[in-house]
Amino acid sequence: MSSSIKNNIIKCTRADSLWTTITLTDADGNEYIPDPNDQIWFALKGSTDDSEEPLVLKKIDPETLELRLDPADNDHPPGTYWYDIEVTLTNGFVTTVVGPCKYFITPQVKNVGVISNG
């Protein structure tokens, strides 16, 4: 798996998996521990246009905070995409906790055979 996350910018090779654990903090920088009934969603789009439907929409388990993207989730043409993470608290309060942030899908190099020196 060839991926990286730095300063909320994600880079992932096309059609690769991406599994990571997210950390949520409040405005003061204190870690937020989600309630098991909180709803946490990751959305990937081709732009920051609110009217655009997400290419990928994944629920993040509030108990593990694991974001798991499968190869099909990253099987889009190489380029720059945008993601955010939204939380709906059990009391109904909705907030975007990450994003919009850049998400780069880089080209993959296919195995085209063995190169021989002769």
Image (cartoon, rainbow, N blue to C red):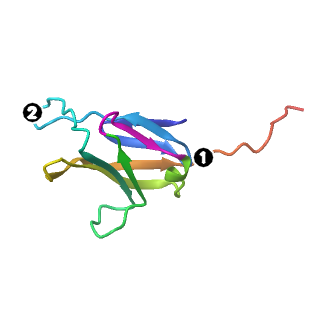
User: Is disc 2 placed on a helix, strand or loop?
Assistant: loop
Q: Is residue 79 left or right of residue 102?
A: right
Q: Nearer the viewer, residue 26 or 14?
A: 26
Q: Is residue 57 left or right of residue 118?
A: left
User: Is disc 1 placed on a helix, strand or loop?
Assistant: loop
Q: Is residue 75 left or right of residue 4?
A: right
Residue 108 tag number:
1
Residue 28 tag number:
2
Residue under the image location 27 percent in, 66 percent down: 50
Q: Quadrant of residue 61?
A: top left
The amino acid on which the numbered mark 1 sits, given as a three-letter code, is: Gln
Residue extending furthest toward the bottom: 51
Q: Is residue 68 magenta?
A: yes
The amino acid on which the numbered mark 2 sits, given as a three-letter code, is: Asp
For the image, the number of numbered tags is 2
Residue extending furthest toward the top: 30
As measured in the structure, the alpha-carbon distance from the residue carrying label 1 to the one carrying label 2 is 40 Å
Q: Position of residue 5 (x, y in %)?
A: 38, 36
